[in-house]
Amino acid sequence: MKPVKETSGTMHMLADLTWVEAREAIERGAGVLVPIGALEQHGPHLPLSMDALAVTEAAKAVAQRLDVLIAPTISYGCRSKPLSGGGPAFPGGVGLEPRTYMALVENVVRELLRSGFERIVVLSGHWENRQFTYEAVYQARQPDDEGTARVMVIESLYGDTVRKSTLDEIFGDDWPGLAREHAAIVETSVLQHVRPELVRADRSVDDAQERFPWWDVVPAPPEFTTKTGVMWKATRATPEFGRKIWADVVEALTTAIDEELFSGSRAHRAS
């Protein structure tokens, strides 16, 4: 893994640099990581900014291990579906139309490429951003574009990063699948670990949809959405679970980014 010279935490943030410092980062081959979240309900105990908080904290952890800067977090994401997050059934959320979201992501990536960054990671932590993120990046950096810049797209914070042994230890035979874990054990435990002051633990509840089919309906029947926004057993979350999940997430992200953009053979051929 490529070692990183120790700097103050703020120096990892692209927005805190001067243009001279940004140019120096580009010249040394530093990468830039774009965290993307959402503003949506996460039950009565977690903040609306849960997804944005999680990807930002993950980016900070990666930046302590690899030479990557952190771009300002995109805190708005595509609108949630009733089955996976509650959608507009709860106040406070702001969901973007996919075309708006894609235009925003494409614009940001294109500008980073124009600035000269050649190692870019787009990390989304919101379920409904999937595929739209990839398509936006594809439009910003099409395969036939000239240059050696590479853009890595990671569209799930927990889907392929948490080890099966960790899930087995936490859930046993009671794992409902990531699609039903909204605002429940995983997210609650993670925030209890990384930002415990933002968790209203006394408001945690267990909840579940009356029906959870594999299809969607517009408009959604009321039984597709829980009354609280929680979709599983949030009361079982613990900071220790969060520590174990987070260790897996950070290790998986760091290893993947290092392999693909820094020490991997593809990065060597591109540099």
Image: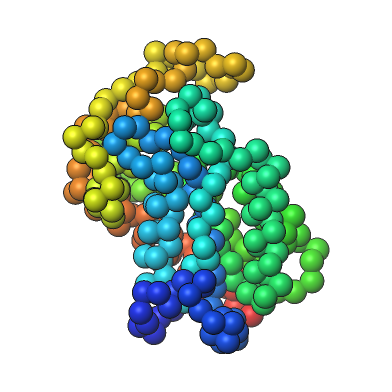
Q: Residue at x 31, y 32 (%)?
A: 44
From the viewer's side, name the closer residue of 43 and 27: 43
Residue 187 picture location, percent across and down: 34, 42
From the viewer's side, name the closer residue of 17 and 168: 17
Q: Quadrant of residue 255?
A: bottom left
Q: Is residue 210 left or right of residue 39?
A: left
Q: Is 152 rendered above or below residue 174?
A: below
Residue 236 picture location, percent across and down: 21, 34
Q: Residue at x 49, y 67 (%)?
A: 70
Q: Is 223 rendered above or below residue 129?
A: above
Q: Quadrant of residue 11?
A: bottom left
Split into 4 quadrants, where in the image is the C terminus? bottom right
Q: Is 62 rendered above or below residue 200?
A: below
Q: Residue at x 59, y 82 (%)?
A: 19
Q: Residue at x 43, y 54 (%)?
A: 55
Residue 257 picture location, percent across and down: 49, 65
Residue 18 picture location, percent across and down: 54, 82
From the viewer's side, name the closer residue of 81 and 261: 81
Split into 4 quadrants, where in the image is the N terminus? bottom left
Visible in this render: residue 270? no
Visible in this render: residue 133? yes
